[in-house]
Amino acid sequence: MKVEIKAGTCRDTAQCFFVLFFFCSVLIPFPAAAGPYTLSIHGSGSNGVHRSSITGYSVGNCSHCHEQHASIDGEEPSPMAGSASAFTLFSDNFNDTAQTGPYAMEDNFCFYCHIATGGVQSGGGITNYQFCITFGGYTVNSATDVMGAFNLSSYHNLYDIQTFAESKFTFFKPTSNPCVACHNPHLVKNHKDNPTDSAYTTISRPTDHGELWGDDANERMSNYTSYRPPYYYGSTTSYEPGGVALHDGSQTTDYNAFCLDCHQYEVPVSTSGLNSMNPTTTSGHLTAIDWSSAGDMHGERPRLFDVGGGASSCTGTIIAPYNAAPVKSNYVLSCLDCHDPHGSVLASGGRTSTYLMRKEINNNKVDGCGPGVQNFCESEFCYSCHTNSHAGAQGCFTCHYHGGKNINCSGPWTGPNF
């Protein structure tokens, strides 16, 4: 294209040079500088985003997610939203009328790719197993993709995440996607295929959205001197994540700091019947969690009894790998040692977990414990690390919950009982 600067359009030579530079900067296709996005899994030139309905764009190109004019070459490729969407995405970020699951692919922009079959990603969907499978070695798949995990009987409610994040974090907007409260899509890496290397982390703390969390050595569970990862499923010699021999937490992301960006507060929930076990928690909210030395027993608070129990047999014992030095005098758990972050427990009748409880913990399958409770048994959950259940098969959580302090429960202890 020829650019002419006509007489009278600029007052002096300097201004003319500026006008010329401006036009050149707009019209000349300078190469984009490589940056964090090209180092992410989404921006990867080999395994990145690649929408099957558009051609002429390399794998990882921004246009696979963004349509700058709600179209490409004058037409809107599939999927068609019918109008421009926020952040120039090819579809709306989130259907905020979907206040509870189950979710359809169209309810969340991320589900268009993070679905095992169908979707828009060239070559088919993307397989993502639950945390207890990818990092813990469990062998039974309740879900094979992210959308499937969010459609299990216990799931992280996306509408609740959206409304809470908007109220707490300045980067989060009314048209943002709930997933970006925990993930920065332009930074996220491929942790599922590199489970033993936290440098491939997928998460960014809500309080530090512009950085990955877990990729630096000071963002690992090894910063807690009393942390040991649980056993890998099927082994008593290898550990999470991924069946490694090293068990000091240096290969595990500090999920506690990450999760507590939200869960240090009472988080409101919209799922019917999902209330905290703790009677002191505001109705319709989850309990604010304190993982410090003044908080829960599974956090940094010193243990009440040694590994052999205490003044009463009801206190039970602690099993391996938590019954050995240096953690037997105290131990700290990671949130994801017990919880699956997207969703948990495939419902097929009977009692199910409602708090993202893992189906496998510390080389133990959390099974049912009798007729009508095929899916989840509280005592079996606790037996993953403890040897005694004095409250009955389904009575553990009557007394033991975040922030529990002998409310309506008796015992030979003082202070918290979880």
Image (tube, rainbow, N blue to C red):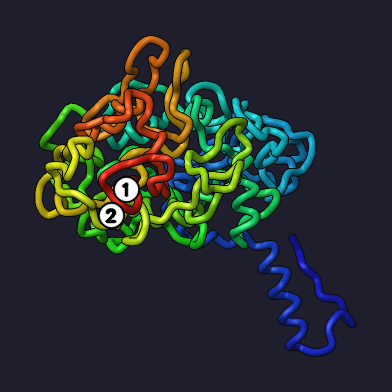
Identify the residue at the far top of this view. 371
The secondary element bearing badge 2 is classed as: helix
* Number of the label disc, if any, that sits on residue 160: none
Task: Identify the residue under disc 1.
Answer: 334
Residue type at mark 1: give it: Ser
Image spot of residue 318 (x, y percent): 17, 40
Q: Residue at image x 80%, y 89%?
A: 12
Identify the residue at the far right of this view. 8
Label 1–label 2 contact, CB within 8 A: yes
Task: Identify the residue under disc 2.
Answer: 221
Q: Residue at image x 58%, y 48%?
A: 282
Residue type at mark 2: give it: Met
* Residue 384 sits above or below residue 198 on the image: above
Mark 2 packing: few (<14 Cα in 10 Å), some, or many (20+)? many
Q: Quadrant of residue 139?
A: top left
Q: Quadrant of residue 65?
A: top right
Residue 182 in view here: yes
